[in-house]
């Protein structure tokens, strides 16, 4: 039953690498399979200025294993104090690929995010003018709005008004988790695209909550109903150019996840490509995996697809992924797809 599939080397358009010992532990896992990744700026303190981004990029490059062929694509964390000139210069220098909007309080380390978009207006206008994409964590953070509705409400009350107001702004809606998000990104006029994570394709809220609470499936935006998972699968496997992979691999040590108030985030970098091959095969759409993981993202960001390739091979015996990774600060649990994965990645 051996079957092989060769695609252009994939990129990850939404990734958390952290810093320090965690960076050292997780970076080789991404660099093994991916040629490039958009690096999220939610460090403590966040990556806010061009100077911060240059320092973080150098830290990542220094942590790369010898012979790794990996380019970090840097982002800046938008705050209400961000200087439009600093952002524009960083883009002109090729230092940054996008700017990231976190509504304040929406996810891990987002306390310095934007409370009122009017206070970031000049930066957004500048970005629209120079064609610098804005990556958006699309959730409202108001207490009255149910956590499962926060993406849908964001589309209606924040994203759509913003895009009407600044139609030239290039927007990537990150980690889409609902059918509403899919419909918006597919059908809206203008310059918009969206990323989809590995775990939101593979699990829904039943996996997280039925039969016991599973902290390693807790992430933001939170996993939704099965019908939303199906809409994500349909969009990802359709090959539609507006949808592409952003794993949102977001490692936290087990101690921070398996506790009374656990951190949000799923660590999926090592087994993402095996998971995706599984999902695309289930949808009888293996021929669209390359579009989703390797072609649509670069096209969106005006970059050439990678020349190198990645070969996947389906074997009778499952891939033996470790359940845990060991970092100097403690164990880190790998995303559990809930079933064996048979697609091996040939390095
Ligand atoms: N979601 N965890 C994190 C970020 C993402 O919203 C996200 O991009 C994190 O730990 O940085 C998470 O659940
Ligand atoms: Zn996010
Ligand atoms: Zn993220």
Image (cartoon, rainbow, N blue to C red):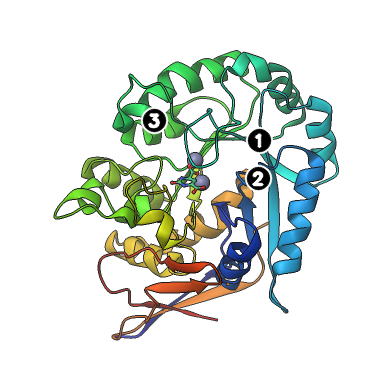
Verify CB contact (< 8 Å) between mark 1 and mark 3.
no
**Quadrant assignment, res 62:** bottom right
Under circle 2, the secondary element is loop
| 180 with respect to 97 (left or right) | left
| CB of mark 2 near ligand 3 (< 8 Å) | no
Tag count: 3
Cβ atoms at labels 2 and 1 below 8 Å apart: yes
Q: Nearer the viewer, mark 3 or mark 2?
A: 3
Q: Quadrant of residue 172?
A: top right
Q: Earlier in the sequence, mark 3 or mark 2?
A: 3
Q: Establish if 202 lies above or below 220.
A: below
> Callout 3: 10 Å neighbours few (<14), some, many (20+)?
many
Q: Dot 3 corresponds to which residue?
A: 151
The label on residue 133 is 1
| Mark 2 vs 1, N-terminal side | 1
Circle 2 residue: 301
Mark 1: give few (<14), some (14-19) or many (20+) Cα within 10 Å. many
Residue 35 showing in the rendered view: no
Q: CA distance from mark 3 to mark 2?
A: 24 Å
Assign the C terminus to one quadrant of the image.
Answer: bottom right
Element at label 3? helix
């Amino acid at each position: 039953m051996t079957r092989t599939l060769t695609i252009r080397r994939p990129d990850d358009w939404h990734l958390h690498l952290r810093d320090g010992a965690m960076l050292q532990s997780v970076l080789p896992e991404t660099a093994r399979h991916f040629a490039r990744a958009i690096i999220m700026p939610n460090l403590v303190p966040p990556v806010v200025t061009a100077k911060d981004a240059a320092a973080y990029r150098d830290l990542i490059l220094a942590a790369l294993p010898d012979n790794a062929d990996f380019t970090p694509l840097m982002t800046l964390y938008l705050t209400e104090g961000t200087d439009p000139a600093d952002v524009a210069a960083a883009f002109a220098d090729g230092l940054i690929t996008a700017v990231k909007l976190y509504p304040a309080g929406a996810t891990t380390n987002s306390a310095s995010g934007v409370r009122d978009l009017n206070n970031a207006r000049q930066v957004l206008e500048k970005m629209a003018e120079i064609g610098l994409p804005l990556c958006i964590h699309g959730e409202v953070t108001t207490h009255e709005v149910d956590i499962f509705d926060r993406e849908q409400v964001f589309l209606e009350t924040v994203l759509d008004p913003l895009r009407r107001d600044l139609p030239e702004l290039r927007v990537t809606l990150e980690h889409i988790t609902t059918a509403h998000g899919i419909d918006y990104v597919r059908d809206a006029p203008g310059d918009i695209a969206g990323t989809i994570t590995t775990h939101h394709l593979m699990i829904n809220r039943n996996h997280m909550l039925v039969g016991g609470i599973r902290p390693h499936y807790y992430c933001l935006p939170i996993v939704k109903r099965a019908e939303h998972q199906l809409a994500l699968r349909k969009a990802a496997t359709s090959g539609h150019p507006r949808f592409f992979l952003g794993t949102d691999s977001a490692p936290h040590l087990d101690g921070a996840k398996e506790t009374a108030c656990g951190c949000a985030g799923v660590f999926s970098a090592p087994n993402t490509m095996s998971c995706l091959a599984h999902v695309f095969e289930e949808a009888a759409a293996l021929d669209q995996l390359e579009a989703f993981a390797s072609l649509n993202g670069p096209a969106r960001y005006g970059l050439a697809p990678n020349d190198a390739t990645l070969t996947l091979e389906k074997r009778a015996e499952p891939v033996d992924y470790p359940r845990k990774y060991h970092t100097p600060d403690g164990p880190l649990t790998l995303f559990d797809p809930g079933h064996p994965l048979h697609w091996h990645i040939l390095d």
